[in-house]
Amino acid sequence: MATAIRAAAMSDAERDARRQLAACYRIFDHMGWSELIYNHITLRVPGEENAFLINPFGLHYSEVTASNLVKIDIDGHVLDGSGAAVNRAGFVQHSVFHRHVPDAHCIIHTHTTAGMAVSATKEGLTPTNFYAAGFIGRIAYHDFEGVTVRPEEGARLIEHLGDRRVMMLRNHGTLVMADSLPKAFLMHWMLQRACEVQVATGAAGTPVAIPPDVIAVHQRDLSAVQLPTGPGVPDFEAMVRVIDRRDRSWRD
């Protein structure tokens, strides 16, 4: 069991980041996106370029709180004195992006059924539904190399990511990163919906592809349906209100 760190040992910015990330873990559990004690959502600590927060290895997403998140650096050193364990697979994958992608403030990796199913197909994500249309031409692909515990895979992950911020890890799952946690949350939600609908469409009949010119218009106009608070912010705040009505212990 992870040991909570002392509140006096952190800045206000870190405290806020911990609460935001803890809320995200609880939201993912509420949405059915947790995977026993595995998978990870990481968040850079504001003002500390080489430090990020990650879930302690051994806790279910429903057990994550602001104080039991683990603060580590990109070399794997625990910085908060908690002595908590960190899943090596999560550290290796997330640290390489936090190290080499400056705008990867938040990184989300999941093994949802729909995400894994689409990642395991030759076609990957196809232009056959509203949500998928927002990602076409913006997804990177990385072939499966086994569990991500070998540092040398990091160079290939970065190469395959290129200038994109969504990746299908073939035969494995999905990876999303963004310059804010709410934006990453919304991107993951949309990608998950795209994968769910694609899987359902395949069972329903013959998929109809959306023409490239329509996809271009769709991607151009998506920003017109966003509130001025920023991408993902109202969506994330709405889900925080949902989990607060169930259980506020994540704030501790």
Image (tube, rainbow, N blue to C red):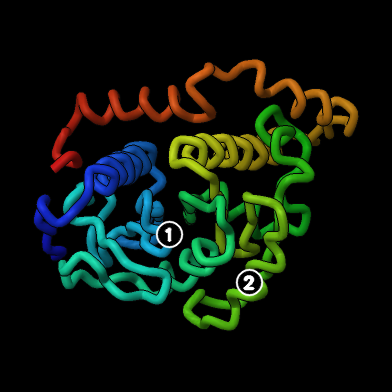
Q: Residue furthest front?
A: 47
Quarter containing the C terminus = top left
Residue 150: image location, x then y, percent: 51, 82
Q: Is residue 131 above or below residue 1?
A: above
* Mark-to-mark CA distance, 1 and 2: 29 Å
At a point 17% along the width and 52% down the height, the residue shown is 67
Q: Nearer the viewer, residue 159 or 186?
A: 159
Residue 158: image location, x then y, percent: 65, 67
Could you tell whether 216 is left or right of 65 in the image? right
Q: Nearer the viewer, residue 103 or 176?
A: 103
Q: Is residue 242 above or below residue 135?
A: above
Residue 192: image location, x then y, percent: 55, 41
Are the residues tagged 1 and 2 within 8 Å (C-beta)? no
Secondary structure state at the residue bearing disc 2: loop
Could you tell whether 105 is left or right of 190 in the image? left
Q: Read off the residue under disc 2.
A: 144
Q: Read off the residue under disc 1.
A: 49
Residue 174: image location, x then y, percent: 56, 54
Q: Name which residue type carries label 2.
A: Phe
Does any portion of residue 38 appear in the rendered image? yes
Does any portion of residue 63 appear in the rendered image? no
Q: Is residue 133 above or below residue 150?
A: above
Could you tell whether 179 is left or right of 71 in the image? right
1 vs 2, front mark: 1
Q: Nearer the viewer, residue 97 or 214?
A: 97
Could you tell whether 219 is left or right of 232 in the image? right
